[in-house]
Amino acid sequence: MKIDKELNNFRGEERVISTPDSKVTVCVIPTNEEIMIARDTKELVEGK
């Protein structure tokens, strides 16, 4: 696995961060864990 350091340091949308000669493709998928926890908590409290 080979990582492109410049692509890995970029923040934002989904992207491939592995180099073209990497044996595997490595992707970054940004998440917002805080909002997911809040939504799950809301559903539990509301009984949905």
Image (spheres, helix red, strand yellow):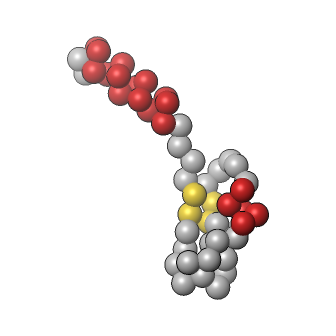
Q: Is residue 12 toward the left or the right of residue 46 in the image?
A: right
Q: Is residue 12 above or below residue 21?
A: above
**In the rendered image, which quarter contains the N terminus?**
bottom right
Q: Is residue 45 above or below residue 8?
A: above
Using the rendered view, name the quadrant where residue 7 is placed: bottom right
Measuring from the top left, give residue 26's x and y in whole percent.
Answer: 55, 69
Which residue occupies 60% across, 81% down? 22
Which residue occupies 62% across, 77% down? 2
Which residue occupies 55% across, 53% down? 29
**In the rendered image, which quarter contains the C terminus?**
top left
Numbered marks: total = 0
| Residue situated in front as seen by the camera: 47 or 18 | 18
Q: Which residue lies most toward the right here?
A: 6
Measuring from the top left, give residue 36's x and y in whole percent.
Answer: 44, 32
Measuring from the top left, give residue 6's x and y in whole percent.
Answer: 76, 63
Q: Is residue 46 above or below residue 31?
A: above
Using the rendered view, name the quadrant where residue 25 is placed: bottom right
